[in-house]
Image: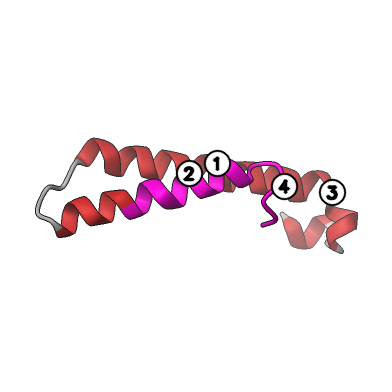
Amino acid sequence: MPADAPGAGLTTAARELLAYARQCGEAGQRDPIVEAMAGAFAAEAANRLVAQVGAHQDEFGLDAERFH
């Protein structure tokens, strides 16, 4: 995803938070709240991506039947 694409910052934040959660777990300091937050950010990023692609299906060369 290009850095200036809608949702790019959220995607980067989700990746960074997931990496942090993994590092905590590997260090024996697992934090279920951080893990849940990472999952929520990832879900929000995925939802925004689906919305962007869905709003511009023609530009991505997708037909409605294949996309949904």
Q: Which mark is residue 56?
A: 3
- Crowd around label 1: few <14 · some 14–19 · many ≥20 (10 Å): some
Residue corresponding to mark 1: 10
Three-letter amino acid code at disc 2?
Ala
Find residue 11 and report its horizontal and vertical position in percent: 54, 48
- Crowd around label 4: few <14 · some 14–19 · many ≥20 (10 Å): few
As helix, strand or loop, the secondary structure at mark 2 comes to helix
Q: Is residue 42 visible?
A: no
Find residue 40 and report its horizontal and vertical position in percent: 42, 39
Label whose residue precedes the other's in the sequence (2 or 3): 2
Residue drawn at (66%, 48%) of the image: 49
Label whose residue precedes the other's in the sequence (1 or 3): 1
Find residue 59 and report its horizontal and vertical position in percent: 89, 56
Q: Which residues are magenta?
A: 1-19
Residue corresponding to mark 4: 5
Taking the image as shown, residue 58 lies to the left or right of residue 54, namely right
